[in-house]
Image (cartoon, rainbow, N blue to C red):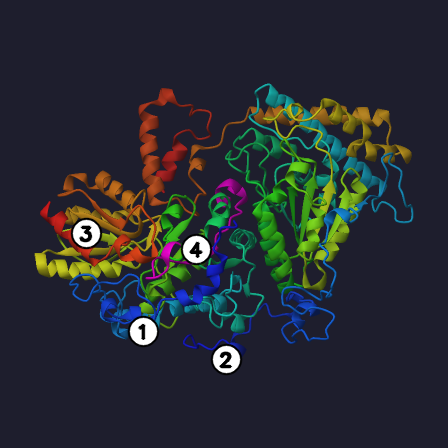
């Protein structure tokens, strides 16, 4: 069979090798226009071009360049205005009162945790932190509109996604303090969370690398959906900033997801800044949303300060990703990064304090939802005070607990590099043990769970 | 990325090794211009003979006598095939036996520029065997994502020379995923990145590279380079079954040149063992991939001329590598030479030599020698002067014995 050379020869063994994945339902749908070029050449009388690389393009004698600056900017979808008033009551907010209160509670919790952790870092009790101020509605709202089975790939400013999916305060704090309870074994910088139970892949500091992962994971899910039609279908969703969208990974990911029909939501948080770089130095097109059309991807731009708009758009996007045998959707969530990039950044070096204060006062995802809740008499100053006091206590309690836990066992410095510890690693652990035993006063070992025994155990295996 | 030589890609099919390489190169009159060949009078260079080399199993009997093969395979049939066909059969076997396996890359649907994916699309469908857009970082990122959700993707990079756009994905994502995920156990094991590597006589700067050492520096990856069709099939199937991500470099000159009897059934070969191809008592020659044939030819001449006995070892897995087999051999012979195509600086030879001096210092009769590519590029007209040839390996054996 392997000595065949003609690629058009019909394989004899094909019938015997029926693949599990031959259901026509998961074959990427190829628009008719893409199929047509191969069978027809342009005729002299044709009004449209039939080159393989351009679809259905009309022939013209006008020497005109298309100019993006003359096109109307892509509109921004919103459900309620800045005063928390619903614009179209017929459309509604797609959220029950109880859900809205829960979402608000989560947003307040995220905001309180941000404030405390930012301060803790300033006091030197934590090495690093990244706050979500101004983007709480995007992460919490989007997460609430996905299924828990959907696989999420985050960038790093998506603490709200973890929170909404059920990551506990203890888990957050254990990760940030790199203690022995951290599922990441204390390996990653703070805010690089991950959870198999919650189907969120671990954050890496590299920007945009998660975007093609989501395209590939979504393709895996598409195949698994087809294999198990009895189970609810799953999709992938990836978060990234507008700065990350300049990386090649973004372009590669959207292109391959489009050609393979991956059911994935590409969710861009456009908060106006990549560390210090404003969008005018980042790109010259109409935001990130304008790029969707270039990849043949359906796209929507959304007011990221409006949690109802976030939820409605993600619910609809999710539905769409499962149509036509699977396809990607691009969602651009507009926001303003009220906080600094990270604790290592002072944003007043590159933007006016008054600009930030202005944004905080004018529009903010928390106050907008609060106004809506107050409008429906679901919320008031007293509830606000009680909630904040309670959440602050919860956060500080988890903080104090985690800060005093043991550090993770030293063996975790070496495990999980490969599936099994290698011979080379074992000989290096032996070498390290020799140094640690010879110079015990040079190292802090007692705060690590199990002390040197955890390393000895590794060598013994 | 504008500098990427896109225009060369359509020429890829022209760069496939020709059958001219199957026999003694200097006696052939290839139909294309020969840029780098030994002159007619050469006694050492040009003596690699793929039809007679003992590295290849020219009969079914020798193929099946391999003790690493499982019992059921050793009693089964064999077929004489070349290396690209062996790679194809490994992927075919994997696709047939494991529904999680996917095969994709640039231009692979029609069979691939080196024909490794021939008929896989026709037989297994476009859902599992498909073309990707031309973006190495995109397709490797896609593969990592698919592996992280339970698939076993085999991603092809058309030439190893073009893997660099995917470097970030391989180093920062692929290799580190299991470690950073910790107890969550999310990883991209099952991912195999295949890429043709090495010189081919006319590949010049961008169709000749052997970038294995850029990956051997990275914990978390496994780097594998097969020497022959049997090895290619067994090691590739082992890589697909392995729960660590694997970089699988295929010496492209061997795709057609190396032909041997290969068991028809599926089998795996160990990913943590070097293999002693020929035992000897005076010198240990360590190599992998194409230069093993060069070494074998040089050893034949050296043993005859110098009356020495040389041991030849194939590393097979370049990282993590089988240090014990090498150290045991050098403790016996007292002399070691490492041979590889890629550049000498910070190369595999440096690591092997350092390990030998740490682990077998008192047994050494001479400094460890490296015969490798020089610190330059593979200029079109200079390939034979840059890449280790029979004369250079012969000279190294002579010098290490005379030391």
In the image, A270 versus B182, the foreground residue is: A270
Q: Quadrant of residue A307?
A: top right
First of labels 3, 4 by sequence position: 4
Q: How many marks?
A: 4
Q: Which residue is mark 4?
A: B242
Residues at marks 3 and 4 on the same chain? yes
Q: Chain of mark 4?
A: B
Q: Which residue is mark 3?
A: B284
Is residue B32 among the parts visible in the rendering? yes
Q: Which residues are magenta?
A: B177-205
Foreground tag (3 vs 2): 2
Q: Residues within 10 Å of mark 3 (few under 14, many from 20)?
A: many
Q: Residues within 10 Å of mark 2 (few under 14, many from 20)?
A: few
**Distance CA(mark 3)–CA(mark 4):** 30 Å
Say whether residue A235 is magenta.
no
Q: Chain of mark 3?
A: B
Q: Residue at x 55, y 65 (%)?
A: B130
Query: Where is residue B199 drawn, in percent x and y?
Result: 34, 58
Q: Are marks 4 and 2 in contact (CB under 8 Å)?
A: no
Q: Are marks 3 and 2 in contact (CB under 8 Å)?
A: no
First of labels 1, 4 by sequence position: 1
Foreground tag (1 vs 4): 4
The quadrant the C terminus of chain A occupies is top left
- Name the side, left or right, on which B214 lies relative to B24: right
Query: Where is residue A173 drawn, in percent x and y?
Result: 60, 30
Q: Find numbered disc 2 in the image and state the secondary structure of the residue it sits on.
A: loop
**Distance CA(mark 4)–CA(mark 2):** 33 Å
Q: Which residue is mark 1?
A: B75
């Amino acid at each position: 069979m392997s000595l065949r050379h003609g690629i058009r020869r019909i394989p004899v063994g094909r019938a015997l090798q029926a693949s599990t994945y031959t259901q026509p339902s998961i074959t990427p749908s190829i628009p008719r226009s893409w199929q047509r070029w191969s069978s027809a050449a342009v005729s002299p009388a044709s009004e449209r071009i039939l080159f393989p690389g351009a679809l259905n393009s009309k022939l013209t004698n006008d020497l005109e360049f298309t100019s993006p600056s003359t096109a109307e900017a892509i509109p921004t979808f919103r459900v309620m205005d800045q005063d928390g008033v619903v614009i179209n009551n017929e459309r509604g907010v797609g959220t029950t009162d109880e859900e809205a209160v829960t979402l608000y509670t989560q947003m307040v919790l995220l905001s309180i945790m941000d404030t405390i952790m930012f301060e803790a870092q300033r006091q030197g009790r934590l090495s690093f932190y990244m706050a979500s101020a101004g983007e709480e509605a995007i992460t919490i709202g989007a997460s609430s509109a996905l299924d828990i089975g959907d696989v999420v790939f985050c960038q790093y400013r998506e603490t709200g996604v973890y929170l909404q999916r059920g990551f506990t305060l203890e888990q957050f704090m254990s990760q940030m303090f790199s203690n022995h309870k951290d599922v990441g074994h204390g390996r990653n910088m703070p805010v690089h969370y991950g959870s198999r139970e919650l189907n969120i892949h671990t954050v890496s500091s590299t920007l945009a690398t998660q975007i093609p992962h989501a395209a590939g994971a979504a393709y895996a899910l598409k195949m698994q959906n087809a294999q198990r039609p009895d189970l609810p279908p799953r999709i992938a969703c990836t978060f990234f900033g507008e700065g990350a969208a300049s990386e090649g990974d973004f372009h590669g990911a959207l292109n391959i997801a489009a050609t393979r029909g991956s059911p994935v939501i590409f969710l861009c948080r456009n908060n106006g800044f990549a560390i210090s770089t404003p969008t005018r130095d980042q790109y010259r097109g109409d935001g990130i949303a304008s790029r969707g059309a270039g990849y043949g991807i359906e796209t929507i731009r959304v007011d990221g300060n409006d949690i109802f708009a976030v939820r409605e758009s993600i619910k609809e996007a999710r539905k769409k990703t499962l149509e036509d045998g699977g396809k990607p959707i691009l969602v651009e969530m507009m926001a303003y990064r009220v906080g600094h990039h990270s604790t290592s950044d002072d944003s007043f070096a590159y933007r006016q304090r008054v600009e930030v204060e202005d944004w905080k006062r004018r529009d903010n995802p928390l106050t907008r939802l609060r106004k809506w809740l107050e409008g429906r008499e679901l919320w008031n100053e007293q509830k606000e005070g009680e909630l904040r006091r309670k959440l602050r206590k919860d956060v500080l309690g988890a903080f104090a607990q985690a800060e005093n836990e043991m550090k993770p066992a030293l063996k975790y410095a070496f495990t999980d590099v490969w599936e099994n510890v290698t011979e080379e690693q074992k000989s290096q652990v032996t070498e390290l043990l020799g140094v640690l035993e010879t110079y015990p006063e040079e190292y802090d070992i007692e705060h690590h769970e199990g002390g040197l025994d955890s390393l000895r155990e590794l060598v013994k295996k | 990325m504008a500098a990427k030589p896109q225009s060369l890609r359509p020429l890829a099919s022209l760069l496939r090794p020709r059958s001219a390489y199957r026999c003694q190169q200097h006696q052939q009159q290839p139909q294309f211009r020969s840029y780098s060949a030994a002159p007619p009078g050469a006694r050492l260079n040009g003596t690699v003979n793929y039809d007679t080399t003992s590295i290849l199993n020219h009969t079914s009997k020798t193929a099946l006598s391999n003790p690493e093969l499982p019992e059921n395979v050793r009693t089964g049939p064999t077929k004489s095939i070349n290396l690209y066909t062996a790679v194809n059969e490994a992927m075919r076997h994997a696709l047939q036996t494991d529904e999680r396996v996917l095969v994709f890359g640039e231009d692979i649907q029609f069979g691939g520029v080196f024909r490794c994916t021939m008929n896989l699309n026709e037989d297994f469908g476009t859902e599992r065997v498909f073309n990707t857009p031309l973006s190495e970082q995109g397709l490797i990122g896609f593969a990592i994502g698919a592996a992280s959700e339970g698939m076993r993707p085999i991603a092809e990079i058309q030439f190893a020379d073009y893997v660099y756009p995917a470097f970030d994905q391989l180093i920062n994502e692929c290799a580190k995923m299991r470690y950073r995920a910790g107890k969550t156990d999310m990883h991209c094991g099952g991912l195999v990145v295949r890429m043709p590597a090495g010189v081919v006589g006319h590949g010049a700067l961008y169709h000749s590279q052997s970038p294995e050492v850029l990956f051997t520096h990275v914990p978390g990856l496994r780097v594998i380079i097969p020497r022959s069709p049997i090895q290619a099939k067994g090691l590739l199937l082992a890589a697909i079954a392995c729960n660590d991500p694997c970089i699988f470099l295929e010496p492209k000159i061997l795709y057609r040149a190396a032909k041997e009897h290969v068991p028809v059934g599926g089998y795996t070969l160990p990913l943590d063992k070097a293999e002693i191809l020929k035992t000897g008592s005076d010198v240990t020659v360590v190599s992998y991939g194409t230069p093993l044939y060069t070494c074998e030819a040089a050893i034949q001449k050296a043993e005859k001329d110098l009356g020495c006995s040389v041991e030849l070892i194939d590393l097979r897995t370049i990282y993590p590598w089988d240090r014990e087999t090498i150290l045991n051999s050098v403790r016996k012979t007292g002399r070691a030479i490492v041979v590889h195509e890629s550049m000498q600086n910070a190369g595999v030879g440096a690591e092997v030599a350092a390990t030998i001096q740490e682990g077998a210092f008192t047994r050494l009769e001479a400094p460890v020698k490296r015969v490798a590519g020089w610190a330059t590029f593979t200029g079109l007209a200079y390939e034979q002067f840059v890449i280790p040839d029979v004369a250079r390996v012969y000279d190294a054996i002579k010098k290490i014995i005379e030391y």
